[in-house]
C-alpha cells in the first residue's frame, strides 16, 4: 500500500525532503515508524522509544493523533497521510 509521510522541523532536515510517498507492507503505525527509522538512519531512536512513540513526537494519521486512536497499534490504511512533528522546546515567551 502507499502512504504519504510529511516531515516537519528537524525531521525534514534529517530526511532531506518535506514529504515522501512510501510503499509499505506495515500493518500498524508501530511497524511504519520502525520502517521509517530503518529507511532514514538519522531518525533512528527519534520516533520510537520503549515500544511507544518517542517523547513528545506527534504522529498523526489523516490529521488525527495516533495516541487518540490505538497508539502504535493503529492500523495503516492505503492512502494515509502521516505527519511527523518533533516536540518544540526552548525559548521564553515575552
Image (tube, rainbow, N blue to C red):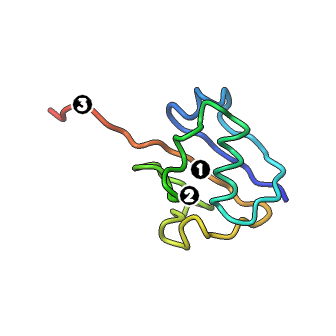
Q: Residue 74 location, x and y as percent?
A: 62, 69
For marks 1 and 2 on the same chain, the one whose residue lies earlier in the sequence: 2
The secondary element bearing badge 1 is classed as strand
Q: Which residue is mark 1?
A: 83
91 left or right of 41 in image: left
Q: Which of the two residues, 72 or 66, is positioned nearer the viewer here?
A: 72
Relative to 66, does residue 56 appear above or below in the rendering? above
Q: CA gap, disc 1 to disc 3?
A: 24 Å
| Local crowd size for mark 1, using a 10 Å CA cut-off: few (<14), some (14–19), many (≥20) | some
Name the residue at 77% across, 60% down: 79
* SS for dot 3: loop
- The residue furthest left is 94
Q: Position of residue 9 (x, y in %)?
A: 50, 34
Q: Are marks 1 and 2 in contact (CB under 8 Å)?
A: yes
Task: Return the residue nearer the eye: 87 or 52.
Answer: 52
Q: Name the residue beneath numbered marker 2.
A: 60
Image point (54%, 50%), residue name: 48
Residue at x 58% of width, y 26% of height: 13
Q: Indicate the position of residue 47 as horizontal and vertical percent values.
A: 54, 46
* Count of numbered circles on the image: 3
Q: Secondary structure at mark 2?
A: strand
- Real-space Cα separation, disc 2 to disc 3, in angstroms: 25 Å
In this picture, is 56 found above or below 60?
Answer: above
Q: Quadrant of the C terminus?
A: top left
Identify the residue position indicated by label 3 in the image: 91
Q: Residue at x 71, y 60 (%)?
A: 80
The residues bearing labels 1 and 2 have C-alpha atoms spaced at a distance of 5 Å
Q: Position of residue 26 (x, y in %)?
A: 76, 59
Earlier along the polypeptide chain: callout 2 or callout 3? 2
Q: Of callouts 1 and 3, which one flags the residue occurring earlier in the amino acid sequence?
A: 1
**Quick check: 58 above or below 87?**
below
Q: Would you say the residues marked 1 and 3 are in contact, meaning their CB atoms lie under 8 Å apart?
A: no
Amino acid at each position: 500500500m502507499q502512504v504519504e509521510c510529511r516531515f516537519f522541523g528537524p525531521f525534514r532536515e534529517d530526511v532531506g525532503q518535506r514529504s515522501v510517498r512510501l510503499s509499505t507492507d506495515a500493518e500498524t503505525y508501530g511497524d511504519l515508524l520502525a520502517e521509517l527509522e530503518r529507511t532514514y538512519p538519522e531518525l533512528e531512536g527519534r520516533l520510537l522509544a520503549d515500544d511507544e512513540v518517542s517523547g513528545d513526537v506527534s504522529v498523526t494519521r489523516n490529521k488525527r493523533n495516533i495516541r487518540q486512536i490505538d497508539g502504535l497499534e493503529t492500523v495503516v490504511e492505503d492512502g494515509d497521510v502521516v505527519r511527523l512533528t518533533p516536540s518544540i522546546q526552548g525559548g521564553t515567551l515575552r
